[in-house]
Amino acid sequence: MRLRPVLLTLTLTVSVAYYVYIPLPASIQEPWRLMLVAAAFRTSMHLASLRDWLGCDGYFKSVRWPPESFDGSGKVGDSSESGGGVVPGVKVSDITFAGIPVRVYEPPAGGEGHLRRGLMYFYGGDWALGERRSSDALSRTVSDELNTVVVSVVYRLYPEVHFPVPYLDCLAAAKHFLSPELLAKYAIDPERVAVSGASTGGNLAAAVAQEISNDDTVSVKFSIQALIYPALQTLDFNTPSYVQNQGIPVLYRPLMVRFWLRYLGADLSLQPQLLVNNHSSSHHSAVSPELRARTDWTVLLPPKHKRNHRPLVVGRGSPGLVKEVPGLLDARVSPLLAGPEVLAKCPRTYILTCEHDVLRDDGLMYARRLQDAGVTVTNDHHEDGFHGCFSFTVWPVEFDVGRRLVRGYLNWLQNNL
């Protein structure tokens, strides 16, 4: 009789270990912690799917971080309201910019001089989940340490909306933020205003920076852009980083393609065709050689990241895909597709990339193309980094690599903004 509980315990332990364990590269620090995070993420997705199937709640609403109260009324608080008191003195206001909800973080009184820095931040979450919790902690820290007015844009998310709505929300808020009247209201130096974002928020930041930089009607421009492992192109889902890191948590290759399709309002059944690059075959007249060259990783990537990978360019493919999903070739969706004349006007740039991230090569190629266009670029590459680790600095998902990435980001802003 005593043997039965032992066998049950052993079976349960082995089952849990089998569910949690994922083979990870040796350079990833704290591997078991990442495995646990990945297991928790998978579990939340499974539970959300079950709730959706039972009709209890919408799939994405049920897996988003618990939403923070926001009524656009201009409610003002301090860091004790939702940040656990980690940054005392930072004033937080929930208001709207040009009708778009934003959260404004103002530093404590005093600091370095009368005029302050300004930073507009677009959080990630694959245009659907919204990383409000982690971006809130980051925004408070930036505001306090760098004497910066930080504006976090609460753009609309999938499934309620898809492209171009999130982009247009961010662009409208950015133009309002850059107006001389508003900069004067918050005592922001117009020569020290940045735009930043992580992952899909980095996609929005890059797209908005391109538009603002090339819009002659906007008198004040962003002086820098800081992009955290940004998603920048939809033409090639077989870059070396997509292939090398397709099974590395928390952003798997099929999942990223699925997020792109959702953002573009496309049929999810197209995922298998995009995974094999059928949408960008050599016979597609819409994909010109010039356009293809803008994502040609065989030219744009450093040798150490090309390794022995071979480009996947199919012969026939599915010509109707580009017509069915026209956003695939829109530079507002894929900033890496912008022409050199557009890139040349972009501000000084910081791009953070992680070795174990499917989006690594997007960031590396963008850094190279910006440099070729004459833009000063800092590429902060981390050999032990993985997608999402920049946000993993808040309990219960704290990683040493995440804290290091955030510190490097803060140091660059301190020296360049």
Image (cartoon, rainbow, N blue to C red):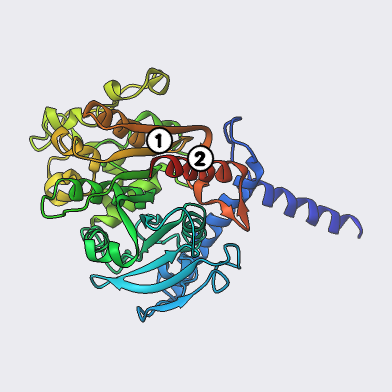
Residue 56 visible within the image: no
> What residue is shown at x 55% (from left), y 45% (from top)?
402
Work out whether 325 lies above or below 97: above
> What residue is shown at x 29% (from left), y 62% (from top)?
183
Image spot of residue 275 (x, y percent): 31, 40
Distance CA(mark 1)–CA(mark 2): 17 Å
> What residue is shown at x 49% (from left), y 56% (from top)?
138
- Identify the secondary structure beneath mark 1: helix
Of circles 1 and 2, the one toward us is: 2
Quadrant (top left/top right/bottom left/bottom right) for the N terminus: bottom right
Q: Residues within 10 Å of mark 2 (few under 14, many from 20)?
A: some
* Residue identifier under label 1: 360
* Residue identifier under label 2: 408
Q: Amino acid at mark 1?
A: Arg
Work out whether 8 lies above or below 237: below
Q: Nearer the viewer, residue 221 or 397?
A: 221
Quadrant (top left/top right/bottom left/bottom right) for the C terminus: top left
Q: Amino acid at mark 2?
A: Gly
Work out whether 319 lies above or below 179: above
Q: Nearer the viewer, residue 19 or 196?
A: 196
Residue 29 visible within the image: yes
Question: Going by the image, does 168 lie left or right of 407?
Answer: left
Question: Going by the image, does 405 lie left or right of 21?
Answer: left
Image spot of residue 52 (x, y percent): 43, 71
Q: Nearer the viewer, residue 284 or 168?
A: 168
Image spot of residue 168 (x, y percent): 21, 60
